[in-house]
Image (cartoon, grey):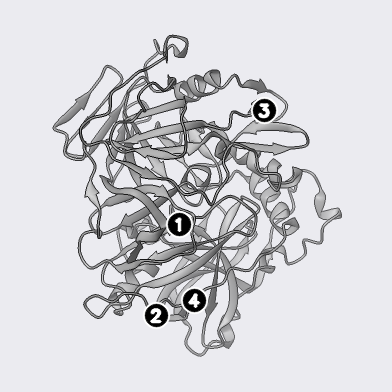
Amino acid sequence: MKLSASVRAFAQIAAIHLTLAAATASRLNGRLEGGAAVVKVDITNIDLLFYQVDVEVGSNRDKVSLRLDTSTADTFVPSWETSCDIAYDPLKVDLIYNTNNSCTAYGAFYWPGSSSFLQDDSMKFNWDSGNGIWGSDVVTVAGVSIKGLSFGVSQFTEAPQGIFGIGHPQRELLYLRNKTVYENFPARLKSQGSIAKVAYSIFLNATGNGSTGSILFGGVDHAKYEGILATVPVVEYVSYSLNTYEDKSRFIVVVHDIYIGWRSHSAETEGAGQDSGSSYYDVTRSTPYPVLLDAGSPLSYFTSEVLTSFSSALGATWNSTISQYNVPCALTSNLTIVFNFSGKTIDVPYTNFVYAFDGTCVLGVLQTPPGAGNHLTLGQNFLRSVYAVFDLEDDTISIARAKYTNEEDIEAISGTIPSATQADLYSSSSYQTSFMEFSATSTFTHNSDPTFNPATRRINATMTATSSTRTVASSTSKKDGAVSSNGPGSLAMAVLLLAANWAL
């Protein structure tokens, strides 16, 4: 993900204003299979903006806190001599907050003092948020030392901290430039024998600044989800209108339906998509969409036609001052958003997508920026309700509703994802409408539909569950139906609202 210049500057200042809650990391000597261990890394939510990972870099084990990003495959750490660019701070809040060295406030790497650092003089990196040198060194995460990990050392940056990228290796800067792949952090864990497969599970945990979730490299924690762990394929994505193509290196899957409905959280119906007798608003009129699952994005993004339908159903009003939708703060406690992924349904509390600040409530779903593709993006406000297993070798994602618990039931991944089953529509021969088509080859074609009219899509559905319906108890550790009182403050919320400029 990339920010426009003004948004990056504002995000930089806001991040320094936030309270730094250091992420803890620990090595998990979990269930072993084939001699491979499971590596658990704790991640901490910082004011609903990002999740943070603690690492140690170099022979001197310099401590640096990095921002987790699943859409980026590279790791970037700030150098000790990093120059920070705050020249275009739009609100001049640097006069209030001390931002000298702001980009090293989360730690920095003194690479000249590391006896194990090897600089690669053949490459220097230059990207939207900074530039610097490239090299390799030992990096310790969760008590596990990765020798010879390649990463960038930022010498000039507009970002408030470094990045811990765990995306597909084909998202690496080197690959995007010259089709050369190196072993990034997840791949390096496997090659040195720390895990058996390049796969990891993400559990963001419940909403709240300072709440701690986890990444489980090479393993699944069966205690952290409820119901069936369903596997869906990562798809290739073609946008004819934008003349763009996305291969399977991005975590794009297919969402077949999105509903707004009134549904009890005491149970989950597997496979049916709706409950018998429930009232629903069909946001996407049973039309499949490609959707990017992005743990690095605080908000979610819908295409214009889907956002129009979604906001209309919620009674939202456009606020031109902040370029965002206002929604009623008086929320229905059992209002949910139901997502159907190839037959696997995930219901998410409506309150996950609402942010309260300064006496108003805004919708945490923005329009996909121009040029960013015709796919939807589901960010942290969706993923906090989901347990997701990303398999980078088999190009699949396994999902279930998250269960908020401190209990653990961990199993290593050595082949297919343990206890996961393919979603009902995983191997569909074809799925075609006048809007787009999806085939079993996992290629997705999207064309805009100028006749789309959300006003005609409201339904009151009474549907009968299929024979595969399974009802399971839901976690009671999280209270749904109310906007969190410890949500982001005005400054942090401004960053969320300005996030419309993210290039996904």
Q: Earlier in the sequence, mark 4 or mark 1?
A: 4
Horizontal relation, residue 366 to residue 437: left or right: right
Q: Which mark is residue 26?
A: 4
Q: Earlier in the sequence, mark 4 or mark 3?
A: 4
Query: Based on the displayed image, in which of its 4 quarters is residue 470 positioned?
Result: top left
* Left or right relative to 91: residue 166: left
Mark with earlier residue (2, 4): 4
Q: CA distance from mark 2 to mark 1?
A: 28 Å
The residue pinned by badge 1 equals 203
Provide residue 161's location: percent of width, then percent of height.
61, 62
Whether residues under marks 2 and 4 lie with C-beta atoms below 8 angstroms apart, the answer is no
For numbered disc 3, what is the local secondary structure? loop
Residue 370 appears in view: no
Q: Where is residue 82? Give x, y as percent.
A: 65, 69
Compared to residue 297, the image places residue 439 above or below, namely: above
Q: Amino acid at mark 3?
A: Ala
| Residue shown at the point (36%, 48%) measured from the top left | 400
Helix, strand or loop at mark 4: loop
Label 3 to label 2: alpha-carbon separation: 53 Å
Q: Residues within 10 Å of mark 4 (few under 14, many from 20)?
A: few
Residue 451 place in picture, x, y as percent: 39, 10
Residue identifier under label 3? 330
Q: Which mark is residue 148?
A: 2
Q: Is 44 displayed left or right of 415 in the figure?
A: right
Tell me the amino acid under the disc marked 4: Ser
Q: Which badge, 3 or 2, is on the more N-terminal residue?
A: 2
Q: Nearer the viewer, mark 1 or mark 3?
A: 3
The residues bearing labels 2 and 4 have C-alpha atoms spaced at a distance of: 21 Å
For marks 1 and 3 on the same chain, the one whose residue lies earlier in the sequence? 1
**Does residue 4 appear in the picture of this structure?**
yes
Q: Is residue 431 above or below residue 469?
A: above
Secondary element at tag 1: strand
